[in-house]
Structure formats: C-alpha cells, structure tokens
Image (spheres, coloured by chain):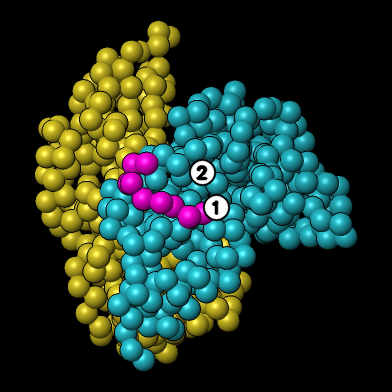
Chain colours: A yellow, B cyan
Amino acid sequence: MVRQSGKLSFIGLGLYDENGITLAGLDRIRSADVVFAEFYTSKLSEGALERLSAMTNKEIMALGREEVEDGTRILEEAKEKNVALLVAGDPMTATTHIDLRLRAHKESIDTEVIHGSSALTAVPGLLGLQHYKFGRTTTLPFPQEGYSPTSPYDMIMENLDRGLHTLVLLDIDAENSRYMSANEGFHLLQEMERRMGKGAAKDDSIVCVVARAGSPDCVVAAGPLSKLIAMDFGGPLHSIVIPGRLHFMEEESLGQWTNGKDG
Amino acid sequence: MVRQSGKLSFIGLGLYDENGITLAGLDRIRSADVVFAEFYTSKLSEGALERLSAMTNKEIMALGREEVEDGTRILEEAKEKNVALLVAGDPMTATTHIDLRLRAHKESIDTEVIHGSSALTAVPGLLGLQHYKFGRTTTLPFPQEGYSPTSPYDMIMENLDRGLHTLVLLDIDAENSRYMSANEGFHLLQEMERRMGKGAAKDDSIVCVVARAGSPDCVVAAGPLSKLIAMDFGGPLHSIVIPGRLHFMEEESLGQWTNGKDG
C-alpha cells in the first residue's frame, strides 16, 4: 500500500482543564492542519476547549460519539493532512481510540501518541495507595431498564479475596451531561450488596473517593461507606476506590482523608 | 499545630523529556521559591533537566536517593517557602513520595500534586491492550547475590490463570546508571521458568515490549519470547507486558507490532 503523507496524532489532555496538556501536546496542536476533539469518553471543565483554542490559535472541532466511532471523517483528513485528535486523560485508554489507531495503520496512515495523565494512575496515588496492590479496574454503568449487572461487585469481591484494592470508575454519559457521582456509585454498590450479600460493600466497609483529580479543588476522602455516601463531593468527575488489605503506610495515608480534605 | 506558610508541590514530569511536563507543572515551577528534582525512581532523557531549567529560568537541584528518602531538607524548606519537587512520570506512584507527602501533612505543610503521564497507563495503551484486563503490576528486580525471588513469575502466572495481562516494570538503579533492558528481563523470566516450570515464560509465549514510551522514537513490539529476547530495542526505559487472553481487537493490535514498529 502507498504510505500516506498525512498523520494522525492522538493527544492526551490530561486531567481537569486546559493546563493538563503537555508541552509536546501543545506543540502538536500548533503544527496540526486540522484539530478535532472528543469528550464523550471523559470530560474537561467548562470552557477548557475554548481556552485551548485561544492559546494555540487553532479552530478545534468537537466531535460527537458517532463521528469518532465511525472515524471516516478523521481518517479521510489524516490521509493528506496532519490531524490532531484531542482526548481527555491518556488517549489510548479508550477502546474507540485503540480501534481508530488500528484502522489508521491499515490505511497506511502514520500515527503518534502524546500521552496525558490519567485517573487510572492519578487516583490511586492521590489516596496514597500503592499501584502494585491494585487488582482489575472496573466501571459502574448507569442502571438501565432490565439491565443491572453485578459484574463490578464480583470484580471488587475477587480483588478483596486476594487482598487487593479496586479502582471503580464511574459511568459517563456525556451526550446527556450525566456523570455518575460517587454517591450514586455507592447506592448502586449497596444494592448489589443486598442482592449478593458477600460483604464487599457493607455500611462499615472502608471506601475512598477522589473528586476532580488534577484540579485545584480536588477532594480526597476515605471512611466507612455509610459516612461517605452522605457527603457532598461537588462537581464531576468522581472515582471510587475499594481498598483491600492495607499496609501500614497505606492505612496512615487514608487516615489523612477522613474528613474529605483537599487532595 | 500551626499551619505553615510554605507549600510542597509534587510535580510530575511525565514521560521521556522536558516536553512531558504539563502547563500546570510549568506554571508551578515558575512560581516556586525552591526547585528540587529526583530521578532515582525513574529517568528522563539526557539534558532534559538543564533544558527545563533554562525554560523556567530556575535553578533545579537534583537530589539523590538518600536526601529524598530522608526528606528533612525538603520539608524544612517547605515550612516557609513554595517548594517544588520534580519527579518523572506521575509523582504519586512511588512510595517515597507518598511517604514524604504524609510527613508534610503531619508537619502542617500544605501539599499539592500536579500529575504527569505514567508508564503505568501509557504502556498498555501503546500496545492496544485494554486497561481493565490487566491484573496486578509487578517489577523485575536486578538479581542480587543470594536473592532471586520468583514473585514476579508467580504474579504473572496468577494473572494468566485468570486470563489477565501483566505489566512488568523493569528495575532502575539510577545511581549506577543501570536500567534493566527488556532482554535482561526476558532472561530473568526464562530462568524463573526453568525453576518453576509452570509455563508463564516459554520460548513460544507471546510477550510485548514498549521502549521509550512517550518519546519520538518509541518502539513497540509483540511476538514469541524467543524472537523478542534477541531484538535490540535501543536505550532505556523498557517495559514488558505478558498478555493473557486476548480479545479480537487486542489480537489485531498486537499484530501491528510483530516487527517492532514505532509506537
């Protein structure tokens, strides 16, 4: 196949707002011919895209879920132009972007990845929990009529049985501006506890919340589920961690956040 | 206790060189009174610190392992001044920094964390493997006289038994400028395979390498251990992934890297 002359750069915007982008990312936006952005797999704060656009003097076109998943427009442009696709967090954590990169390579379009910081790494660290003590990550989906999977509960239980922590990501429905709060997440876990009864999410289970990781008003909290479920963590994004066996230093770390201090 | 007037900012430098820092990080260096850096838990490319110093017009003092672990000098300065501690990757992935933050809080010193991109998130994504299919992360330590643990092998086996991928971080001995290569890592795994014989690292096991994640000459490779162990991946840092059960798209993704293409 003929090597195309364009390029597709996946650029991670990191956490929270326009200041989470790296110098490398900023440089790639400035040298791009076309700049797209997608925010249905994550979220940046209000106005961040506009400020990024002003900062780089580039028009940034926000794409919806369908256009990113379909990918045709992005790939067509990238055959002959330098195209940047901006993504909150690290760009290669979402299946959609892995798929898009694969398709670009099949069409002989060069790609590059400019990494960004991600909740996957930031959230455990903010709590002071050790990354190598985490088992599988899971996501709590918004409940749907006739569909209430308990797989996140099972995953937490499987990790707990082995003494491991679980990072619980909370569902994002960006097209309807719905971002699951930690409180909603705890309610869902309580409901699963009622159905499964294995003890992963009891009232006195120690649980953790990180709200707005990477922002100046990041909140970190740890304590019994019955206490945290009633706390107000403010705006999105929230994440939950269910800790397993705690090392001494991890226990001390969580002790810092019993009143939901600033992270 | 009296709230101190200083502050300690942990600033992630992200991957590879000075361009992995975020705008938020750059801003904090510029407003800091004292700037320290530590590179024994990770590594940036040659000259990155000097270029960062020139860019921000700040003197950056590189600290050795002992001074960071001891922490006294950093905490003393942070009682009255704005102190920035620069760390490659995301600053809260190393136990030393979690510990230092805890000690700062005990002395009523405010802290903040400016996140950076990390191999923990970047490496799985570059390979096109899905983060929620990873089990526990492990680290291969440099062999020492009379100490040859097989715990990394056991961890890989435990993940494989459950169909999960394993991110295998490779040891860093920065004070002696030793960074374990993927090839050394594979030799260690082969030796463990000879002792344990459970099949986690056979000659025909599919394994993956990411070299210099986040750099312009990042290399990504996937294939049988017997092939990758003989390949030259260039300079540090390297990481290994041992994949478990592959989804269709993951299999396709790994197929892109059979000749060690640029990531």
**Quick check: A175 above or below A62?**
below
Q: Chain of mark 1?
A: B
**Quick check: B231 above or below B17?**
above
| Direction from residue A159 to residue A143 in the image, left or right | left
Looking at the rendered structure, the kind of residue marked 2 is: Leu
Q: Is residue B55 magenta?
A: yes
Look at the image and tell me whether residue A134 can be seen.
Answer: no
Q: Which residue in the structure is indicated by mark 1?
A: B39
Quarter of image, res A36: top left
- SS category of the residue bearing label 2: loop
- SS category of the residue bearing label 1: loop
Q: Chain of mark 2?
A: B
Give percent across and percent down for residue B121: 46, 50
Give percent across and percent down for residue B172: 65, 50
| Direction from residue B94 to residue A36 in the image, left or right | left
Q: What range of the chain is rendered magenta? A: B54-62
| Direction from residue A213 to residue B156 in the image, left or right | right
The quadrant of the rendering that contains the N terminus of chain B is bottom left
Look at the image and tell me whether residue B228 can be seen.
Answer: yes
Identify the residue at horizontal 29%, vertical 33% (top origin): A27
Identify the residue at horizontal 33%, vertical 67% (top origin): B82
**Quick check: B197 above or below B246?**
below
Q: Which residue in the structure is indicated by mark 2?
A: B44
